[in-house]
Image (cartoon, rainbow, N blue to C red):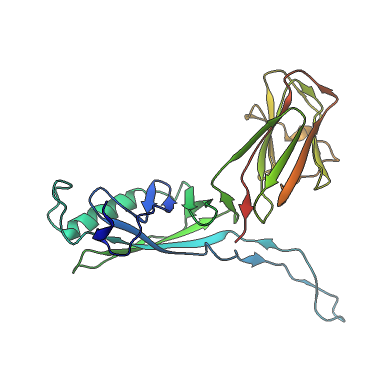
């Protein structure tokens, strides 16, 4: 769509909320513009419990805190063209174009029960999984048909992840580089045949050990974020984790992951899927 329809507007399509593409023109020449994403470029809130010292002492003990879910507000406008584009639409005025765009936008925001991906193409394209946490608002300007909108969102996981998924498949050792600035999760799969496997993150000095035999053609899936262990991605095998095990994340920089076991058969190995992560 010709950029002259909205002078100064860049048709970059660099913000996407699920199937909704912002900073772009739709087929009717309406500009779907993102003006801001409150909370995207900020740090998430922090929860820090207070542990008071005994009554005769001042202050509190230093305690570990945690980052809260990322709260976001997506803001923008739907701007119809100054005139109807011949051969493009059957609408007769700009207000009808904006109304149609608003309805299409609203139909795509079924996020009360579902989540979707918010993608932002900044210096390193990043994304997070979000859910709508309040009523979206649409304010119409009857004089020119322009519609301003705000969409309240929440990312339960406050990290911003790389849009590019890194997938590794090795026999016994892999170097997983987290190019971000904050620890990131991963999905690891131990492929059989293998008996009593252990995955160690050398830099984190942590290991996950399992008392299980994984047959040829099977795999043990380990979700580092949700701390789940599934055989073939279905059957819960968290109980096979041994007591010395210690959960870990992929730290910023290099992470050397080593697979060892009582027995490693032909075709066994380790698969690792992850995205680099940032907090700001």
Q: Is residue 67 left or right of residue 58?
A: left
Q: Position of residue 143 (x, y in %)?
A: 18, 69
Residue 215 x, y percent position in the rendering: 73, 19
Task: Please state the horizontal and vertical placement of residue 183, each as a whole percent of the image.
Answer: 69, 52
Residue 244: % across, % down: 86, 41
Q: Identify the image quadrant of residue 186.
A: top right
Left or right relative to 218: residue 15: left
Q: Where 61 falls versus 258 (above or below)?
A: below
Q: Nearer the viewer, residue 4 or 103?
A: 4
Q: Residue at x 49, y 61 (%)?
A: 72
Instruction: Say above or below: 178 vs 61.
Output: above
Closer-to-camera residue (182/153):
182
The quadrant in which the C terminus is found is bottom right
Specify whether residue 86 is in view: yes
Residue depicted at 33% across the width and 49% down the height: 107
Left-right relation of 37 to 189: left
Which residue is more in the foreground, 90 or 52?
Answer: 90
Q: Say which of 46 and 273 sits in front.
A: 273
Compared to 161, does 82 lie above or below? below
Q: Is residue 210 visible?
A: no
The residue lying at 15 percent from left, 51 percent from top is: 91
């Amino acid at each position: 769509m010709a950029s002259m329809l909205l002078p100064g507007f860049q048709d970059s399509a660099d913000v996407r909320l699920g199937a909704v593409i912002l900073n772009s023109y739709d087929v009717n020449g309406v500009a779907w513009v993102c003006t801001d994403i409150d909370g995207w470029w900020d740090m998430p809130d922090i929860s820090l419990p207070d542990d008071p010292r005994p009554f005769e002492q001042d202050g509190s003990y230093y305690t570990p805190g945690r980052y809260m879910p990322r709260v976001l507000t997506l803001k923008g406008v739907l701007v119809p063209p100054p005139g109807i584009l011949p051969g493009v639409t059957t609408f007769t005025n700009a207000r009808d174009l904006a109304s149609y765009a608003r309805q299409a936008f609203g139909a795509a925001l079924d996020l009360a029960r579902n989540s979707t991906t918010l993608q932002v193409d900044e210096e390193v394209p990043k994304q997070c999984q979000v859910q709508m946490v309040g009523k979206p608002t649409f304010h119409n300007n009857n004089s020119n048909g322009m519609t301003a909108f705000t969409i309240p969102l929440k990312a339960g996981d406050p990290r911003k992840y790389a849009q590019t998924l890194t997938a590794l498949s090795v026999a016994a050792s892999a170097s997983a580089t987290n190019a971000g600035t904050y620890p990131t999760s991963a999905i690891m799969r131990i492929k059989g045949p293998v008996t009593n496997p252990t995955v160690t993150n050398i830099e984190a000095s942590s290991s996950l050990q399992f008392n299980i035999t994984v047959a040829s053609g099977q795999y043990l899936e380990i979700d580092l974020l949700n701390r789940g262990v599934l055989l073939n991605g279905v059957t819960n095998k968290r109980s096979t984790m041994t007591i010395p095990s210690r959960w870990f994340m992929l730290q910023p920089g290099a992470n050397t992951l080593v697979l060892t076991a009582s027995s490693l058969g032909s075709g066994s190995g380790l698969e690792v899927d992850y995205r680099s992560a940032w907090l700001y």
